[in-house]
Amino acid sequence: MQIEFVSPNTALSPRSAVAVLVFEGGALGSAAQKLDTATSGAIGRAISASRFTGAKGQTLDLIAPAGTEAARVILIGAGPAASFTAKIAESVGASAYQAIKLSGVETLTLMLADQTEAIAAQAAFGVRLAAYRFDRYRTTEKAEKKPSVTKVQVVVANPDQTTDAFDPLSTLADAVYFSRDLISEPANILYPEEFARRVKRLEALGLEVEILGEKEMAALGMGSLLGVGQGSRRESQMAVIQWKGAPESSEKPLAFVGKGVCFDTGGISIKPADGMEDMKWDMGGAAAVAGLMHALAGRKAKVNVVGILGLVENMPDGNAQRPGDVVTSMSGQTIEVINTDAEGRLVLADALWYCQKRFEPKFMVDLATLTGAIIISLGHDYAGLFSNNDALSDNLLAASKASGENLWRLPLPASYEKQIDSMIADVKNTGGRPAGSITAALFLQRFVNGLPWAHLDIAATAWKKPSADPTIPEGATGFGVQLLDRFVADHYEA
Ligand code: BES
Ligand code: MN
Ligand code: ZN
């Protein structure tokens, strides 16, 4: 996808669709007005003949109207003119792309000459998010089923300044793509070592990446993480990614920890067959952290950040761990494994402990597709936020608002701790059906050693099927990358 910013006197590319803004109530943006005049009122007539009102997300497609060279004119609803923001522009750019991606036109021309550079850049970012597609394994798809748009021209008053405003957003889109690709890959291709190799390649961006194998993790005493991978033919891995963007700083680093279960069969507590294929994206937390590190390095963020990924595969096998087994975590705490399908918390227990021990970070934020219960609690449009620290939690909620990746905070009541008390060990890995996402978070809290910490349960938001958001094509969302990039930029950068 080629995106360029051009000035208003640029000639239209052949086979292009021209997208113009229409505000709620039918108020035409200035480009729409000009086209309406050129087409002898075709736009006004089309609006009167339809139910198009200019509400955000609506589109109306006029094919080859007389009076313009455009192959199509797309009216895009931008909502009320008074509340038009960069965030809405992002969604509008995405809707325009979605409306014509399969139409046969090759160029999408977004008419935004009367908008600010920031708004035009954000609209182009929306197009990039919308244009993501994972088609690596399609070999027989017919040409007419593939998106036809290969080029996007954004008509703006100041192309150079808008290009400068777009550059960091384009870098962020690259990071979201990286995260979405990891999530989309099937588990026969993306197993722990392959995930680690792809992360290792990020060294080209200036990140430092260390990979720990099973031997190193055993030496560190990570019996909890290793127990999960024990039934797999694939070796478990831990990726330690460092971005040292503020080498002079004496501040402690920020730390992000991701659950990277490359496939979750449930283990001996095996899951039902129906829908099990979805468990290839049980590494969405690790993919979000990897995407964040990509984003920070991409824009040379002036901050020191550590990303830790616990990468395993949860399989049933003669060597797999059994329900009832007791494992010893790196923290020294023993864990009774009641259900081998509650494996994410076992992986994070050691990843969190290792993270705080080695780096003594300012705080830790973990991301994990941790519980089915969070889908029941919050549905697919919110991730659950759990934290032992109000200031950290507030900063995450603020970044959530700014990025549009929704979080909702849930409590960590001490009175529920007894649900995870074990008869024979320090803790057990399941707390029964009541408040399943909360008891999972309470389990994690036992491994943060009192550090400021937040846990994001992204089981419902890592993947959308179907998706109602034009910036998210069906499939991997990359949830967390934009949120955390914003969180770091707005609250912790010099
Ligand atoms: N990876 C799953 C959680 C999940 C479920 C993510 C559905 C996305 C969609 C996790 O490892 C799991 O299996 N959790 C169990 C915990 C239970 C055994 C206590 C669950 O939620 O059922
Ligand atoms: Mn599981
Ligand atoms: Zn899982």
Image (spheres, rainbow, N blue to C red):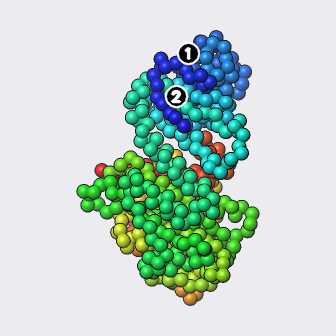
- Residue 190 visible: yes
- x, y (%) of residue 330? 45, 79
Residue receiving disc 2: 153
399 vs 3: above or below = below
239 vs 401: above or below = below
Image point (32%, 51%), residue name: 302
- Residue 450 visible: no
* Mark 1 or mark 2, whichever is nearer to me: 2
**Residue at the farthest front position:** 139
User: In the figure, is residue 93 to the left or right of 269?
Assistant: left
User: In the figure, is residue 283 to the left or right of 357?
Assistant: right
Residue 52: image quadrant is: top right
Circle number at residue 34: 1
Using the image as rendered, state which of residue 383 and residue 185 is in the foreground: 185
350 vs 27: above or below = below
Using the image as rendered, state which of residue 214 and residue 247 is in the foreground: 214
User: In the figure, is residue 41 to the left or right of 252?
Assistant: right
Judge: label 2 CB < 8 Å from ligand 1.
no
Local SS, label 1 = helix
Using the image as rendered, state which of residue 438 and residue 164 is in the foreground: 164
| Disc 1: CA contacts within 10 A as few (<14), some (14-19) or many (>=20) | some
Image point (67%, 23%), residue name: 62
- x, y (%) of residue 467? 65, 47
- Quarter of the rendered image showing ligand 3: bottom right
- x, y (%) of residue 370? 58, 65
- x, y (%) of residue 439? 56, 71
Label 1 and label 2: CA atoms lie apart by 18 Å
